[in-house]
Image: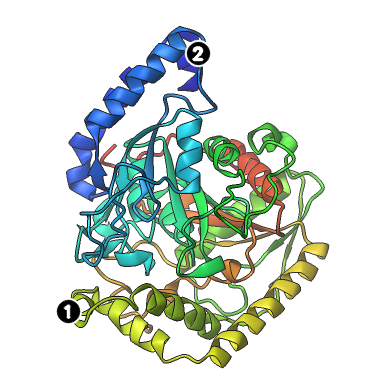
Amino acid sequence: MLSAFRNGELSPAEATAAVLERIEQVDPEVNAFCLVDPEHATRAAKESTERWARGAPEGLVDGVPTSIKDVLLTAGWPTLRGSRSVSPAQSWTEDGPSVARLREQGAVLVGKTTTPELAWKGVTDGPLHGVTRNPWDTGRTAGGSSGGGAAAVALGMAPLTVGTDGGGSVRIPASFCGVFAHKPTYGWVPHHPQSPFGSLAHVGPMTTSVADSALLLDVIARPDPRDWSTVPPPAASFLGNLDSGVSGLRIAFSPTLGYVRVDPEVAAVVAEAARVFEELGAEVEEVDPGFTDPVAEFHTLWFAGAAKSVEHLTPEQRAELDPGLREITELGASFSAGDYLTANARRAAMGALMGRFHERFDLLLTPTMPIPPFEAGREVPPGWPGDRWTSWCQFTYPFNMTQQPAASIPCGVTSGGLPVGLQVVGGRYTDHRVLAACHAFERARPWRDRRPPLL
């Protein structure tokens, strides 16, 4: 698209008009957007078209239609976080850091994408905006909590989308919807106001290709003075370092992390994907990282964050919350400071373990999800032994605990034609390596020819 803008084959106005038409055409089928602003988008695209005509684009993504997850502040639009407890009747004058960087670089913001209430779970449904559905099978979930963004990207409703990931929330829907997503090393993409889930929550890109996510990271991985936990920006461009490949890398492949039950079809697709890295010149060894399931500690941190996010609500407002969210906030309010510190101590131990692991292995490969997408409108699949979303997301939330970069890239489909994602994990601050490995895999096993039925 940027190349077409540059050579005059396409204008931002035309691209934005096509995206808005696409949203009108297919969004009623999937419910990816909770807000669309054609007037704002058309005006911004017209201004971008004029800049390109002068040969003076404003930034790296000038004129590219982009959507924002509805937990990130966006000036001029309400940020309701999928909740009736947030009043739209207030002043919305501030952009969050990633949104501010997008505006500075000329992106055309078209709307906000759906999230479950307060982004609390790994599927996207809630009392305010309803159910977001999977582009490959609208009877199934798109995943979450950035499910709206994944569905929008998969169906051509937004080439670039920014989501958040506190326990897998860009990777889960990327796997279920057949798109690429990257959870950056914590601190590289600023977040303000800080998520109630604290440093579990990362901000990251969701796109149809690795290169697009690398470009988007080049835009949003820039410090912001409002985030006290932000770190200095990367020394090199993510997009400019995609071609380093994987030849000579030491890569660990863990089919189960030592404790996850994986659907046989998913396991077979991911194992075949892992073999591709050997074909590309890497040394791949099947080995588990060596930690046990940290779900209890994750629950302590996650549920306590959820409790903090609703502590100001009246009893009447609490009664209107998603029932599952209400349950975990009640649990979270029962934890002590000692419980929280104990969970953080386990988190620190996991971080140290993975730091040592990555002295031996450059990357770790796992399935992104142990199962294909299941029935929409449910927190867990029918007949599933667990009652919380974390019971089927065991591959994703451990790497929020450790703050490592982790990406999900499409690697195949089940016999029923549903996408399967491969998770690629690196040591902290090795995002360039993770993205380069995904780019090499993408070139070896192209995905773009696979299209969801609605497309």
- Residue drawn at x 35%, y 45% as measured from the top left: 93
Residue 235 seen in this snapshot: yes
Instruction: Tell which of 90 and 234 is nearer to you.
Output: 90
Category of crowding for the residue at label 2, using alpha-carbon neighbours closer than 10 angstroms: few (below 14), some (14–19), many (at least 20): some
Secondary element at tag 1? helix
Residue 414 seen in this snapshot: no
In the picture, measured across the screen, residue 210 lies left or right of residue 144, that is: right
User: Which residue bears the numbered disc 1?
Assistant: 316
Q: In which quadrant of the rendered view does residue 222 lie?
A: top right
Secondary element at tag 2? helix
Location of the C terminus by quadrant is top left
- Residue drawn at x 22%, y 43% as measured from the top left: 27
Q: Is residue 28 above or below residue 159?
A: below
Say which amino acid is labelled 2: Arg
Q: In which quadrant of the rendered view does residue 305 lie?
A: bottom left
Q: Please state the horizontal and vertical placement of residue 263, each as a whole percent of the image.
A: 45, 69
User: Which residue bears the numbered disc 2?
Assistant: 6
Q: Please state the horizontal and vertical placement of residue 8, each as a whole percent of the image.
A: 44, 8
Say which amino acid is labelled 1: Glu
Q: Please state the horizontal and vertical placement of residue 414, each as a whole percent of the image.
A: 41, 56
Residue at mark 2 to residue at mark 1: CA–CA distance: 54 Å
